[in-house]
Image (cartoon, rainbow, N blue to C red):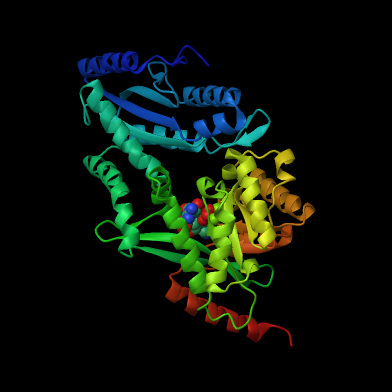
């Protein structure tokens, strides 16, 4: 780390002062100043699961990466526990700050080795420009923070525009509306097929929640699931997902084929002791075999409170419910933990599958997860398959199950009925006598 980065936490006031000087200078010279905020979204998770030394190393790595894009007059300041501000002096136009944001985004896609774990530093990036979006430090900061708020929700970098404030405000507003969404039938379960490889016969679906807001249109689950966790609504949403999926599963045209529905659960839910009993009750109410249900839990969720999570998952396994470790490869589980995970399936994160044809590192990770799964007698699912070349590569690598837009996007209950009827009949037609 060079003298360009103020590494110790300077305090917000000191930071605002420096920003103020940069603004004054650029206004005096008639130049544009770019303010880019970069927050490390998974820093707290890394501190909790891997320890503070790991968190410290992550901050150092982030600062070093950011320094790479800095020119002599630029400055990096760590303005909060998990946030860096880049002050980019003498920007020619908006496009330059967007180029810088893009560069940062790409740099943070690369994994880093921290205390023996390979992780991705997850960032959200908000950009604002002086004088266009503010001529004093607090206004400019507010604009960059509003952009960052939208960036966090959409998992992209975001340049401030006046509509960003409205969107950021809107995102705050919808938290309260989640309360009525369930009561007023705005939530639906959609289903994305999972297919057996190599014959591509459907053997299950993943249930994915959708919120159709009457004014705002569809809202993505990665926005509202996090909100539901924060405001204590995640249990209601999970019971809705579980009960709707089990009820609708019984209505699908399965023609006696073995079939499974997978629902996603968050760390808060999987840590609850009573969760396995509630699942057991729901299976009885809807008269569904335990083996027809999969609970998907992310690798990271398991590591938050491993003892409690493992206890619940073991109880579910005893019931006969299947357990899938979602987004596998992005978390921090060590092999020591892994050997005790009561899982039936590993789901390779789609970020590796997307790039596996072009990137030898990602291909190697996919192969390693497949080998690991096979070594432990687990099934392995690849999600995010978008073309036939990726499918062919995964078949050659020994992957069992496929999921992705190449086969189908998540479909409504009505549409999955049609899709399954058609797909299962065509599989029957080509099956050897
Ligand atoms: P996930 O569990 O990893 O779900 C897979 C996501 O990958 C889905 O996004 C799906 O639409 C997307 N996907 C699948 N195949 C492809 C592909 O080929 N290309 C691309 N670009 N994307 C693909 P979705 O539906 O937006 O869900 C995002 C996340 O939200 C899920 O990630 C899951 O973590 C969470 N989620 C969704 N529904 C629920 C729910 O009912 N409960 C909980 N707790 N979380 C949910
Ligand atoms: Mg999932
Ligand atoms: Mg996933």
In which image quadrant can residue 305 be found? top right
Q: Does residue 5 appear in this view? A: yes
Q: Provide residue 13's location: percent of width, then percent of height.
A: 31, 15
Instruction: Name the residue nearer the viewer: 153 or 430.
Output: 153
Answer left or right for 49 relative to 369: left
Q: Residue shown at 40%/32% (left/top)?
A: 100
Residue 20 lies, in percent from the top left, at 26, 16
Q: Is residue 101 left or right of residue 199?
A: left
How many tags in the picture? 0
Q: Which image quadrant: the C terminus?
A: bottom right
Is residue 15 or residue 356 the one in the foreground? 15
**Residue 378: image location, x then y, percent:** 73, 57
- What is the quadrant of residue 431 in the picture? bottom right
Which residue is depicted at the point 51% across and 26% down?
Answer: 62
Above or below, 146 relative to 394: above
- Where 154 falls versus 98 (above or below)? below
Q: Residue 414's spot in the image, x, y percent?
A: 43, 76
Above or below: residue 407 compared with residue 303: below
Instruction: Give residue 214's quadrant in the image.
Output: bottom left
């Amino acid at each position: 780390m060079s003298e360009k980065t103020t590494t110790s936490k300077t305090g917000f006031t000191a930071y605002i002062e420096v920003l103020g000087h940069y603004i004054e200078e650029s206004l005096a010279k008639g130049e544009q100043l770019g303010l880019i905020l970069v927050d490390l979204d998974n820093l707290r998770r890394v501190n909790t699961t891997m320890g503070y030394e790991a968190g410290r190393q992550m901050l150092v790595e982030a600062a070093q990466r950011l320094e790479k894009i800095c020119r002599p007059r630029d400055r990096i300041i760590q303005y909060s526990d998990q946030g860096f501000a880049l002050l980019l002096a003498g920007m020619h136009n908006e496009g330059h700050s967007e180029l810088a944001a893009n560069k940062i985004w790409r740099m943070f896609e690369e994994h880093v080795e921290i205390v023996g774990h390979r992780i991705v530093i997850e960032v959200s990036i908000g950009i604002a420009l002086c004088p266009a979006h503010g001529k004093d430090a607090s206004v400019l900061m507010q604009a960059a923070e509003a952009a960052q708020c939208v960036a966090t929700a959409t998992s992209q970098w975001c340049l401030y525009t006046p509509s960003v404030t409205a969107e950021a405000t809107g995102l705050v507003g919808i938290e309260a509306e989640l309360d009525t969404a369930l009561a007023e039938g705005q939530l639906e379960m959609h289903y994305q097929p999972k297919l057996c490889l190599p014959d591509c016969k459907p053997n299950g679906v993943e249930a994915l929640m959708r919120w159709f807001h009457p004014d705002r249109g569809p809202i993505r689950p990665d926005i509202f699931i996090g909100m539901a966790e924060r405001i204590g609504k995640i249990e209601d949403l999970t019971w809705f997902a579980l009960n709707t999926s089990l009820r609708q599963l019984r209505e699908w045209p399965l023609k006696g084929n073995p079939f499974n529905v997978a629902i996603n659960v968050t760390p808060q839910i999987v840590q609850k002791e009573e969760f396995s009993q509630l699942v057991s009750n729901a299976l009885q109410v809807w008269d569904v075999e335990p083996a027809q249900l999969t609970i998907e839990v992310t690798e990271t969720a398991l590591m938050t409170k491993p003892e409690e999570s493992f206890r619940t998952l073991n109880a579910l396994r005893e019931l006969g419910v299947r357990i899938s470790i979602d987004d596998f490869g992005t978390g921090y589980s060590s092999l020591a933990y892994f050997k005790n995970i009561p899982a039936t399936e590993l789901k390779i994160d789609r970020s590796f599958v997307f790039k596996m044809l072009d990137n030898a590192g990602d291909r190697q990770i996919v192969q390693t997860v497949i080998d690991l799964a096979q070594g432990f007698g687990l099934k392995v699912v690849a999600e995010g398959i978008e073309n036939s070349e990726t499918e062919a590569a995964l078949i050659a690598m020994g992957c069992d199950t496929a999921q992705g837009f190449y086969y189908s996007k998540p479909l409504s209950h009505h549409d999955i009925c049609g899709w399954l009827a058609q797909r299962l009949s065509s599989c029957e037609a080509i099956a050897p006598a």
